[in-house]
Amino acid sequence: MKRTILLLLTMVLAIVTVGCTDDFEEINTPRDAVNIVSPDIMFLPMLQNPMRNYQRNVNLYSDFYAQYWANTVSGFESPRYEYVDGWIGNRWREFYTQTLAESITLKDWYGEDPTYTNVLAQVEIWICAEWARILQIYGDMPYFGAGLGEFVSYNTEQEIYYDLFDRLANAVDAIDPGDSSQYAFTSDTDLFFRGDLEKWKRFGNSIRLRLAMRLANVDPNKAQAEAAAAVNAGVMVSNDDSALLPIWTEGFSDYLHQMGSNWDNIRISSTFTDFLYNQSGSEDPRASFWLAYEEGSPLADSGVFTGVANGYDLVPESANDNATINLVDGYSGFSPNGNVLINLPIMFYSEVVFLRAEAALRGWVGGNANALYLEGVQASMDLVGVDAVAAADYIAAIPTLSGSNEEQLKQLITQKWIANFPNGEEGWADFRRTDYPDITLPIDGVSSNSTVAPDTWVKRVRYPDNAHELESEFMPASRNTIPADRMDIRLWWDTADTKTKSGGLMSSNF
């Protein structure tokens, strides 16, 4: 009897199991579940990624290393080139698990539907820009096959740059602004260009130009070909094309207005303020748009903006009297404008003009290098809101490009560095690539806890702890342990040691 009952139970379970297997997914999926969401919902957080954990991911590293900002809090480790995993270690994780994952999901969901060709091309341009942004922090990274749930080998910078060039070119070519049948992001989702696809195409080409010039010293043939192709395809043409990420007045965002005002963690670097006075013989007219004194500061009576030296271990009390960011009036990028509190720059039009100027100096594209250089300064003045007369006086007073190519490049990059403020990611990248402008070493010296040799500039950020714990076998052999993963290792395109300068000039850029 027991055997008969067990046999009957087994047969019933088998029937139920077989019957359920055919429609298992349907039965176990709630009828009100959302499996695919609007592309807008996925794309918006992708665009906002640069403001995610901005202080820990960018300000404490790239912004300090570009010497736009200096710390006012004693004991901050990164200004003296120490690695802090609890700070910038977030950046790696957030990129791979959020931004990259979101881009892959959008392609998986909509890649087979031609109605979404334009928006997927915008996604592609943006994820390429984000790849480039993180690549210039770390160097070799997991790239091909990354984000698909498996460990992959780290690819070389060269492999990644070459692929990004192709991806950008293909994405720009895929956009058809005249196709009315295409799905379009809403103006509230497209934070940069409010649905203007021509601007997206120019942005993609401009990113391609930026990456091309990054390779100028290490791979000049490829750099020349890509720079010429980008310019011929059409780069940014005015300040209206600048890619600026708006941050709203309502709600929290971790950006410069928090660090420079609410948290009182940073002040403008003295390196930066020095350059606001040493280019034209008088104060740069952008200074009062960008900077303001702390209320009650005794330095205000001097009429001269004076920043804080970079790299203090113990910051002097007087540091908080120095100039900070202007959050009251002046430059619209830093001031409330409607419901936008402040803009985080991704790419200024002026940067693109300076890139063209350098490419022209190298003979890679048409145009006069000096004329483009001055045009870049003018574009920055216009964006900031400087009076036409004051801008003209400044431009007339700064040296025109002359002398050797190295001398001309130094002046060009110096003005580009000023105009790129406060985009510390690009300011630091340009310094590492060209070793211009002249910036200082930490005032209290390179920390003994850093992996940067004394009297040497920081060149990259090491891989995070969890990458070493989980992926060491996939890393480059020369950097697959924490002691070997040093922050004075030059990236692929950073070809020369800054300490080889002679008379303020390198001999490595041409």
Image (cartoon, rainbow, N blue to C red):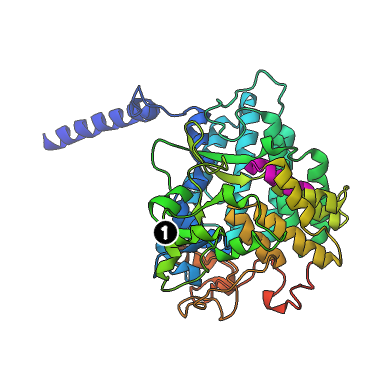
Q: Which residue is painted at 44% across and 58% down in the image? A: 297
Which corner quadrant of the image does residue 506 belong to? Answer: bottom right
Q: Main secondary structure of the magenta part?
A: helix
Q: Which residues are magenta?
A: 375-386
User: Where does the C terminus fall, quadrant-wise?
Assistant: bottom right
Q: Is residue 309 left or right of residue 243?
A: left
* Nearer to us in this view, 201 or 283: 283
Q: Residue furthest front?
A: 301
Q: Residue furthest left?
A: 1
Q: Is residue 338 visible?
A: yes
Q: Is residue 381 magenta?
A: yes
Residue 264 x %, y %: 40, 56
Residue 415 x %, y %: 71, 56
Q: Which residue is painted at 68% across and 41% down in the image? A: 387
Q: Is residue 153 visible?
A: no
User: Where does the N terminus fall, quadrant-wise?
Assistant: top left
| Residue 175 versus residue 411 in the image, above or below | above
Identify the secondary structure beneath mark 1.
loop
* Nearer to us in this view, 118 or 493: 493
| Residue 168 versus residue 115 in the image, above or below | below
Q: Which residue is mark 1?
A: 265
Q: How many labels, in total?
A: 1
Which corner quadrant of the image does residue 229 belong to? Answer: top right
Q: Is residue 288 left or right of residue 398?
A: left
| Residue 110 versus residue 497 in the image, above or below | above
| Residue 213 versus residue 313 in the image, above or below | above
- The amino acid type found where label 1 is placed reads Asn
Q: Is residue 366 left or right of residue 129?
A: right
Q: Is residue 229 magenta?
A: no
Residue 272 x %, y %: 60, 61
